[in-house]
Image (cartoon, rainbow, N blue to C red):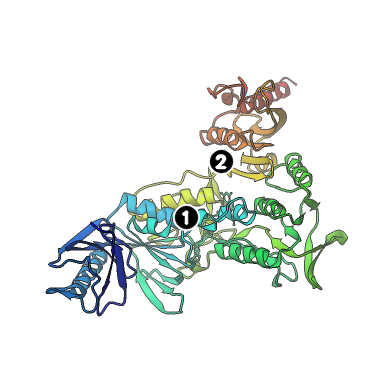
Amino acid sequence: MSERANVIEVSGLTKVYQTAMGRPPLRAVDGVDFAVRQGEFFGFLGPNGAGKTTTIRMLTDLTRPTSGNARVLGFDLAREVTRIKQKMVRERNSMPHLLIIGGSDAGISAALRAREVNPAYDVIVVVADRYPNYSICGLPFWLGGEVADWRALAHRKAGEIEAQGIHLLLEHTAQAIDPAVKMVTIVDEVGRSRRIPYDSLVIGTGAVPARPPIKGLEQPGVFFLRTMADGFALHDYLAAQSPASAVVVGGGYIGLEMAEALSRREMQVTLVEYLPSVLTTLDPPLGTLVGEELNRHGVTVATGVAVEAINQQGQHLIVAGSGGFRAEADLVLVATGVRTDARLALTAGVETGRWGAIRVNQAMETNVPHVYAAGDCAETYHRLLERHVYLPLGSMAHKQGRVAGENAGGGQAAFHGTLGTQVVKVFDLVAARTGLRDAEAREAGFDPLTMQIETWDHKVYYPGAHKLYLRVTGDRRTGQLLGAQIVGHRAAEVSKRVDVFATALFNRMTVGELGDIDLSYTPPLSTPWDAVQVAAQAWVERQENLEVK
Ligand SMILES: Cc1cc2nc3c(=O)[nH]c(=O)nc-3n(C[C@H](O)[C@H](O)[C@H](O)COP(=O)(O)OP(=O)(O)OC[C@H]3O[C@@H](n4cnc5c(N)ncnc54)[C@H](O)[C@@H]3O)c2cc1C
């Protein structure tokens, strides 16, 4: 069979369907996909009828391009398309509707899980932008040039999502929810408004960058980084202006990743942090190691500085802060955290909590019946604290979204809670934490004891051994493990070591029990007592000494 393309123009339909002979169906914009094989025409029911294929035997040879009214030898293609579409609409109308607002980590996880547990559901995801399921966590690596193509940041392509029977409404913004009639008002990219019904609704509207009280944030050359659009804006500026210097405001994980990214572009970078050390999610002795790593790679670090104003002066921006701080730069990136985006939820009367984030239970249900929420717009149940906190992380957005999707699809799942486990790579160093730090544990009513040790990631006789710095926090009275922090070389398996602590925390183990776990050993990778166990043993020894005294 030849591989010639067929073009079928159908009067009454605006689309031109083009396919190669014998190839799988091509996606058609108005919801019906087509494939043409010699003598046959396939109407492919998608997206919600994905997998169902209607075959219409045609009395013609479509190896020749066919145009005009496709009454090809008595077969009315236009009517057949209408029939298929009407069938799809009838099928969809008879299905329960799951509507999801937000197409990032939480929203897409919810959609995929709902279709898995209940394929009978009609799942629609409304996404404000054109980038569903992109890993915004990867933006610093694209901006720094380590990832060559932004398209590679897609967890999944739109077509792959739709192939799961999920209908994506891109560039549509949900504006209001009316829970009394279970309708959501959405507006498309040209401002047309319509209402969509739901049986279950998942809100996954995420977060927006915090805007600190700094004068001059609106100026050209000042950037925030949250969405793909933010990433493109910054990328375009870097390409067009070739800035030589940058000030990064905020020493959290995004600020640190961006300080590295901009340095990789050979820019002179100054990182400004309000608190006394960078990465304040770690205790200062470990945060200081991260600051030193930045210095080693040419980044100037200014701590204890509150940035107050950004002013244009000639071609440059002048960043001014407390204590007489002044830095000149061609670009300023503000990375001072995020705040929940619960605006849509508020239109439905959904309750929010202390941080303005949506209140949910462990089933990810809000106070409004049939309305669920997940990800950065919602509160997170903390497994150790046994209460909800606001801890916006992609790792949790995926898990919460899955639970919300399962329950919205008629299942019965529970979110088992966060431990605040997180990790960041800064040049050659990796810093990670899980659980509670000393002060946090004390505030939560524990009697914490914290021990810091230095040890090796693997046997020192094997080349390439690196120092690891570990801090372990446990409850002095009960011995319960409460948290751990680790800093070490990027080759020292820091993240997986912190994950060992996280697993122990999840299972409410004592620090002493960590020593009993059968962890792997080979000289190039670890020691017979792994660094995790060396730290745990040091903690137990200290606890015992304190008891003796
Ligand atoms: C630079 C960067 C690096 C990061 N690195 C990490 C990391 O290493 N590890 C980690 O765990 N986390 C990381 N995060 C955080 C992580 O990306 C977020 O926690 C995660 O994206 C949250 O997912 P979400 O689906 O809740 O919300 P978001 O990703 O904020 O997505 C919200 C979605 O809702 C849509 N939306 C909002 N309002 C509407 C509306 N009214 N109508 C329709 N659609 C709407 C948006 O278009 C978007 O699709 C990083 C974040 C950034 C910015």
Residue placed under numbered mark 1 in the picture: 106
In the image, taking residue 398 as reference, residue 528 lies left or right, namely right
Answer with left or right where residue 179 lies relative to residue 346.
left
Judging depth in this view, the residue of 267 and 95 nearest the camera is 267
Residue nearest the viewer, comparing 209 with 546? 209
The answer to whether the residue bearing label 1 lies less than 8 angstroms from the nearest atom of ligand 1 is: yes
| Beta carbon at label 2 within 8 Å of ligand 1 | no
Numbered mark located on residue 341 in the image: none
Image quarter for residue 61? bottom left
Q: Position of residue 489 (x, y in %)?
A: 68, 36
Instruction: Please name which of the two marks, 2 or 1, marks the residue nearer to the observer.
Output: 1
| Residue 32 on image: x %, y % | 28, 66
The quarter holding residue 268 reads bottom right
Type of the residue with mark 2: Leu
Q: Earlier in the sequence, mark 2 or mark 1?
A: 1
Which residue is the site of mark 2?
Answer: 384
Where does the image place residue 264, in percent across and percent down from the top left?
69, 52
**SS of the residue under disc 1:** helix
Residue at x 26%, y 60% (from the top left corner)? 21
Residue 313 in sight here: yes
Disc 1 residue crowd, few under 14, some 14–19, many 20+, Cα 10 Å: many
